[in-house]
Image (cartoon, rainbow, N blue to C red):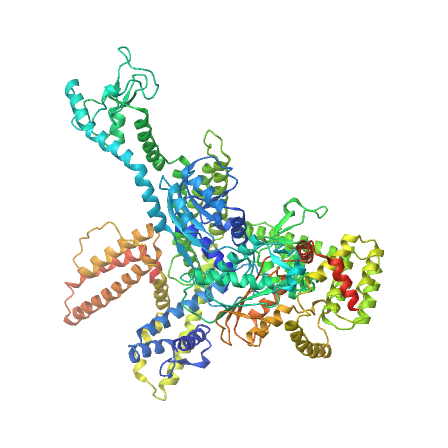
Amino acid sequence: MYESRKNGLYKDRMAEEDKAVMEGFLCPICKADLGTPDQLVTHFQNEHSEDQDLLKSFKDLLGIAKKKILKEDGSGSLTFGKPRELFQWEPQEIGASTSHLKSFEEARSARLQRLFVPTNQLIIRLDKLLDNMPSDPIKKKAHEQNIVPWLDGDAVPRCPNCTRSFHVARRQHHCRLCGSIMCDDCSLFLPISTAMKMLDKASEVRKHSEMTLRVCSHCLSLLGGRERMKESRKCKPIICQLYEKLVECREQADEHAAMYIKMSNSLSEGETVYSLNDAQALRMTIVKLAESIDVISGKILNLDGPPEGGSASVRLQKSVRMATTAYLRTQLLRLPSLLSESDYKYAQFRRRQQIQAKIQEEKTRESKLKSPGVRPDFNSPQHNRVAAPTNSSSSNDIQDVSVGQGWVPEKKKFFDVDDPLLLQMNILRNYIQEARAAHKYDEVVSLEANLQELKDEYWKQQQEIDDLASKEESYTSGSDTTTTLESTEKDEGSQSNHSDNV
Amino acid sequence: MNVIFAVKSYITKMAEESGPGMKVLLMDKQTTSIVSIVYSQSEILQKEVFLFERIESGANLETMKHLKCIAFLRPTKDNVALLSKELRNPKYGVYYIYFSNIISKADIKVLAESDELEVVREVQEFYGDYLAVSPHLFSLNLAPCAEFRFGAANLRASNHSDPLAWLPDQLTRSVQGIVAVLLSLKKNPFIRYQGSSDLAKKLAEKVREVLSKEESLFNFRQQEASVLLILDRRDDPITPLLNQWTYQAMVHELLTISHNRVSLAHVPGIAKELHDVVLSSEHDEFYAANLWRNYGEIGQTVKALMDEFQRRAQSQQKVESIADMKQFVENYPQFKKMSGTVSKHVAVIGELSSLVTKRNLLEVSEMEQELACQDQHSAQLQRIRQIITNGKLRDEEACKLVMLYALRYRQHQNNDITGLVDALKKRGLSETKTSMIHHVLEYGNLKDNNSVRGELVSQEAVVKITKRLFKDLKGVENVYTQHVPLVKETLEDLIKGRLKESAFPMLGKSPPKRVQDIIVFIVGGVTYEESLAVHQMNQDSPFPVRIVLGGTTVHNSQSFIQEVMESTRGMNVTSSSLRTNRMR
């Protein structure tokens, strides 16, 4: 049911796009023939306001149809013979999958517990040992034995590591971490500074930092293994840093390129939503980004591999370079070129003509409809809408913009203007400048639309004041406002000339 | 029901689930082909997968902790052992592990206990366990899949009348392949199989076993009824023996496509970059648009492509103004791509046409088609004699003609198989070559004197004869492409709900009359001719059906004969040929 309605809508909308108006602009719900698209929309909004979702899909479809048409015009791609017959099958979802992560993690943590308990115990002991360690040797010894009970020396006649027997010259020593016994030759020493690092307390200034802890080889290897693991997680070779930079540039370039394509399409249609200069500036930015992407990937390619001369890292570097060149070639170099100044003028001229023709056509339709007196109530608000068709199309464009890139003008300047409208206008102009600098052209467009509204409002106000003034014939107070007005006009002329020629 | 999409979306998901950063893809031999057949290198590079390693090689000894490792492996014992070794001493920073099929809990535990450094972030089953050749065609690349059951004579006395039996490994792999297809397409089908074939029956039973064992996996939101139909190549040994004239099938028959690649290295004087060309409908627009076209049409489209290319090349040459230059740079990638496409297809088609002339294929194919589609024994016998005594013919083609004749007129009263074999011997063919005819005959001897199929044949024969009459009345459009593979008739019967239960029994519940989705699997391999038939049925069938075709492999005549020879090795073919003689 919904599907069929939608199709009907689509057809109507398509017909409208093609300006093949013979079928008429039928309301999809009450099937009444409304003369013009705008009448249809108003009719729809007034009569069927409860079907909001339908209205939305209605509007979306306009966008779809538009995109479709734009695409068909703009592509110069190669076609080989007959286009490939597409499968008429419905969109397919991804196949089934089963996750074993949970059982995997359970089995793993059971295993790790057995392995990591000793290591963690060592770390806890180390922490306790270093905490408030007395400098006096006797006290220190008591402190150590308090934390780690030392093995009884009588039970150990030989060093368990080298199997040589203990005597006066070869004395017994204790590992400070596990309390086991060894000879001096088999003892290892852990510098306190290193130990502090292991405990992530390196920043703490300690008095015994030059001292060491006597430990056995077993304990040191356990601790060392943990250290290596920590190290490997943090390790980040140069290629990573370069690659991160590369990805950052690519993301920027993608964002700009999407914007640029939209601008370029709009411009070649002769629309005046974006300015040609802006597009050129954006193109330059993209080209600069492309250059830096190329340079970075070149650097990655020429990186020296690790000393082992591994073939894998060389292959990795080559692949990154290859991917980047492919990206540059397919994405950035293929951007459409802009129209020249004169071509743009011509496109604008053509579009204006088309719009004129359309207005004319709609007017004749309206007059036709008016003469028998059908629905005169829709005609009065109509003129305003028809007069500014570019605005309506631009507002459609704005709807397409993905939200969430969250651009906010940063600085806020205050202006010494009394009139709140003028103040607003000045602030807006400031925003527009910032937006342009940040390549947020959609914001520029919407801000300019706002500015235009403000200006209209301001004009109206001034007109009223003037009227009043002329009626009361008191010229003294009027001169002040006129000068402000003139100055604002100049300002507008220099900053947003293209929004004026709508 | 698009198998390429199914596998591709799995791989895309793998690449994306691991998040941004440089990645390495760790695969085994089979998953390497599974991935490479659907994803081109440049495509996967854009997913930040920059390195490709094979788990069994262990060639990369370098530690690269800054890489994320995506391991896509078949769940074999060897792979689990290799992977757990890798995890004990990990070369890469983190691991995302995907198995291409169902893996046992015990194996998961082995892996988990090897992961002492906690490098594993993900363990999943992604059922991309088959080669997705076309959107509706998959292959498992298994050949041969069966062997001669020794002592078949004894077994024949019991219930087992089928002389062939599955090779155990191939059976397991086939079950896994079909299960993966079903899971990746989210289908829980009704199962039917070719009753006359033990191979088909066995496979159907095994698949059914998995379906009921892993019930929870197959618990999909039930859609339209789907059917898994398992057939046996021996039901139709004719199709793989025929010469083909549509582009894809022809390239496979004459040049052999393996994993979307064609080797032209043997062609004299060919450019080095054309030694190994890739023919992928996913990445080559020209190929995608033309793979179903016939030889004549292809010639024309290639000419059009050439003209177009020349036109563009010329316009590129006069780079005079800055504007020209700009345009050239903008079109350059397209231009380069196009020139690659042009030279590739021109080389392939050039080689095809030279083979067609050299092997006298037009005449051969006409004879083959007549044999396969028409019923004029004596006239055909005479022509075959004439053709095979003709010196211009290659031995292989002569041999294939006799095979077709033998298969076709095996039960004809006046057949002269021995006479033709003698004629081949006179041509100088060795005993081993001529024995191939008997092997093929024995292979194709799928219980047709058995009562079940026998009745069916006689019934269907009437239908076939009337069909043929109609065809004769209409006149043949193209003598080289008259043949319609048997699978098409079988499928049409299935769609119309007319497939006999006696010949194609069901396992478990019987499906409803109307089915929407069909997965056909041919034990012993499929052909591109059948792929085309299925493609056409998908495109414009009077019924809205979706069919996916699969097989243990994709055959051309050469690989088919090889499979026949290997499957029937040890069979006493001379006695059977004696039997045919006696039948005369």
Seen in the image, is B362 located left or right of residue B237? right
Seen in the image, is B244 located left or right of residue B427? left
Q: Where is residue B547 in the image (x, y as percent from the top left)?
A: 54, 67
Q: Position of residue B106 (x, y in %)?
A: 41, 48
Q: Which residue appears farthest toward the bottom when viewing the image?
A: A372
- Image quadrant for the N terminus of chain A? bottom left
Q: Position of residue B429 (x, y in %)?
A: 80, 54
Q: Residue at x 18, y 70 (%)?
A: A470
Q: Where is residue B404 in the image (x, y as percent from the top left)?
A: 74, 64
* In the image, residue B370 above or below residue A24: above
Of B582 and A474, nearer the camera is B582
- Using the rendered view, name the quadrant where residue A92 is placed: bottom left
State whether residue A483 appears in this view: no
Q: How many marks?
A: 0
- Using the rendered view, name the quadrant where residue A457 is placed: bottom left
Of A109 and B25, nearer the camera is A109
State whether residue A270 appears in this view: yes
Seen in the image, is A366 located left or right of residue A484? right
Seen in the image, is B137 located left or right of residue B268? left
* In the image, residue A292 above or below residue A194: below
- Image quadrant for the C terminus of chain A? bottom left
Q: Which residue appears farthest toward the top when viewing the image?
A: A169
Of B100 and B190, nearer the camera is B190
Of B476 and A449, nearer the camera is B476
Q: Residue at x 81, y 60 (%)?
A: B421
